[in-house]
Image (spheres, helix red, strand yellow):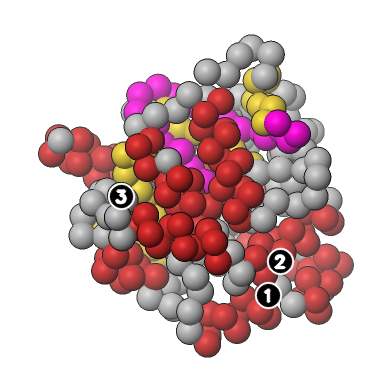
C-alpha cells in the first residue's frame, strides 16, 4: 500500500480554480516518474483511464458518482497535470505497465475500469496482465484490438503524420476543436474551456497526442496480450459500452458486443466522441445502475 512519503497533495496551477476542478490533487511517485491523480469518494473502485488528452474529461461523471463509488483517475507522465516523463515519452504498452504500478501502489482490488479512446488499449493491457484485479469493464468510444480496415488505418496515419503534427504544434487546433461542442465543450462555460486547454500551453503536450496515434498502429505485443485475455480470462467479465450516436464510424460498439457475451450497450443520443461530457447524467446513471445490477447478480 502506498505510504505517506510517496503520495502527497499538490497545489493546482493558477489556471485551474477549484470552482472548475473541485478535486484534491495528489502526486504519486512510480519508479522514475510521478503522476498526478484524483481519488474521490468511498465504496467500490471505479478507475477511469484515458490518454492523449487529460482527466478533465471525467470531471462531470466523477462529481456524479463519487457519492456511491471510489472514483480514481490519473494523468500519465507528460499529459494533463502530471510532470514530464523522466526517460522519454511512454508508449501505450509502457503506459499500461505504469498503470499496473499505480494500481499496486494504491493497493486497488476489485476494480471496474472505465476506459475512453486509447485508454481502452492501455486499460485492457492492464486488465490482461492483472485479470484477478478487474471486476468489470466500461468502454466509452474506445477499442482494444489492432486497428483494421483501410479507413481507420488511414485516419491514424493522417493524424500522426508530420504535417498534421507540425500544424497542431503551431496552432493547437486539435485541443481547440476538442474544447468545442463537438468535443468536450457542449456544457462547458468559458472558464471551463480555458481550464481544459490549460495543459496545452506546453507545446510538447500537443505533440504527444500524435505520437500515440502512431503507436496505436504498432503496439502489436500489447494487442496480442489483450486478444488472448479477451478470448480467455476476461471473456466472461461484465462489459458496458457507452458510445456517442455520432461517433462510431468503425463499428467499435458492435465488435465489443461480439467479443464479450456478458455485454450491454447504450447510445448517447446526439453524442459525439466524449459521451461522458455530452450527457454526464445519463453516463453516470447508466454506470451506477449497471454496476448495481451486476453486483446483485453475484
Mark 3 or 2: in front is 3
- The answer to whether marks 2 and 1 mark residues whose Cβ atoms lie closer than 8 Å is yes
> Can you identify the residue that label 2 sits on?
210
Q: Which mark is residue 128?
A: none
Q: Nearer the viewer, residue 59 or 17?
A: 59
Query: Compared to 225, does 86 lie above or below?
Result: above
Please state the horizontal and vertical placement of residue 289, each as a whole percent of the image.
Answer: 24, 42
Q: Residue at x 21, y 60 (%)?
A: 261
Mark 1 or 3: in front is 3
Please state the horizontal and vertical placement of residue 293, each as a whole percent of the image.
Answer: 18, 41
Region of the chain picked out in magenta, as a range: 31-49
Disc on the earlier residue, 3 or 2: 2
* Left or right of 69, for residue 74: right
Q: Which mark is residue 159?
A: 1
> Marks 2 and 1, how far apart in space?
6 Å
Q: Is residue 32 magenta?
A: yes
* Left or right of 40, for residue 298: left
> Marks 3 and 2, how far apart in space?
32 Å
Query: Compared to 264, does 254 lie above or below?
Result: below
Q: Residues within 10 Å of mark 3 (few under 14, many from 20)?
A: some
Q: Residue at x 78, y 62 (%)?
A: 207
> Can you identify the residue that label 3 sits on?
233
Q: Residue at x 72, y 64 (%)?
A: 211
Disc on the earlier residue, 1 or 3: 1
- The answer to whether marks 3 and 2 mark residues whose Cβ atoms lie closer than 8 Å is no
* Left or right of 103, for residue 75: right
Q: Is residue 258 magenta?
A: no
Please state the horizontal and vertical placement of residue 65, each as a whole percent of the image.
Answer: 39, 35
Q: Nearer the viewer, residue 251 or 243?
A: 251
Amino acid at each position: 500500500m502506498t505510504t505517506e512519503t510517496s503520495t502527497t497533495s499538490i497545489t493546482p496551477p493558477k489556471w485551474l480554480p477549484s470552482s472548475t476542478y473541485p478535486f484534491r490533487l495528489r502526486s504519486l511517485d512510480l519508479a522514475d516518474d510521478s503522476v498526478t491523480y484524483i481519488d474521490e469518494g468511498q465504496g467500490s473502485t471505479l478507475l477511469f483511464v484515458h490518454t492523449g488528452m487529460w482527466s478533465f474529461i471525467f470531471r462531470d461523471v466523477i462529481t456524479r458518482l463519487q457519492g456511491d463509488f471510489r472514483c480514481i483517475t490519473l494523468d500519465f507522465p507528460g499529459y494533463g497535470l502530471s510532470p514530464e516523463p523522466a526517460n522519454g515519452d511512454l508508449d501505450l504498452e509502457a503506459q499500461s505497465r505504469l498503470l499496473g504500478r499505480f494500481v499496486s501502489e494504491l493497493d486497488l482490488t476489485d476494480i471496474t475500469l472505465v476506459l475512453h479512446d486509447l485508454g481502452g488499449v492501455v486499460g485492457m493491457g492492464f486488465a490482461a496482465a492483472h485479470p484477478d484485479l478487474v471486476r468489470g469493464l466500461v468502454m466509452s468510444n474506445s477499442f482494444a484490438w489492432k486497428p483494421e480496415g483501410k479507413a481507420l488505418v488511414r485516419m491514424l496515419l493522417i493524424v500522426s503524420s508530420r504535417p498534421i503534427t507540425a500544424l497542431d504544434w503551431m496552432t493547437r487546433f486539435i485541443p481547440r476543436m476538442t474544447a468545442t461542442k463537438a468535443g468536450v465543450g457542449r456544457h462547458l462555460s468559458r472558464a471551463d474551456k480555458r481550464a481544459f486547454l490549460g495543459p496545452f500551453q506546453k507545446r510538447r503536450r500537443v505533440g504527444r497526442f500524435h505520437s500515440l496515434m502512431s503507436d496505436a498502429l504498432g503496439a502489436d505485443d500489447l494487442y496480442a496480450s489483450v486478444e488472448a485475455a479477451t478470448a480467455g480470462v476476461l471473456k466472461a467479465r461484465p462489459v458496458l459500452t457507452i458510445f456517442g450516436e455520432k461517433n462510431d464510424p468503425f463499428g467499435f460498439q458492435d465488435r465489443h458486443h461480439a467479443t464479450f457475451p456478458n455485454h450491454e450497450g447504450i447510445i448517447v443520443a446526439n453524442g459525439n466522441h466524449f459521451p461522458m461530457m455530452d450527457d454526464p447524467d445519463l453516463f453516470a446513471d447508466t454506470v451506477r445502475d449497471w454496476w448495481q445490477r451486476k453486483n446483485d447478480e453475484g
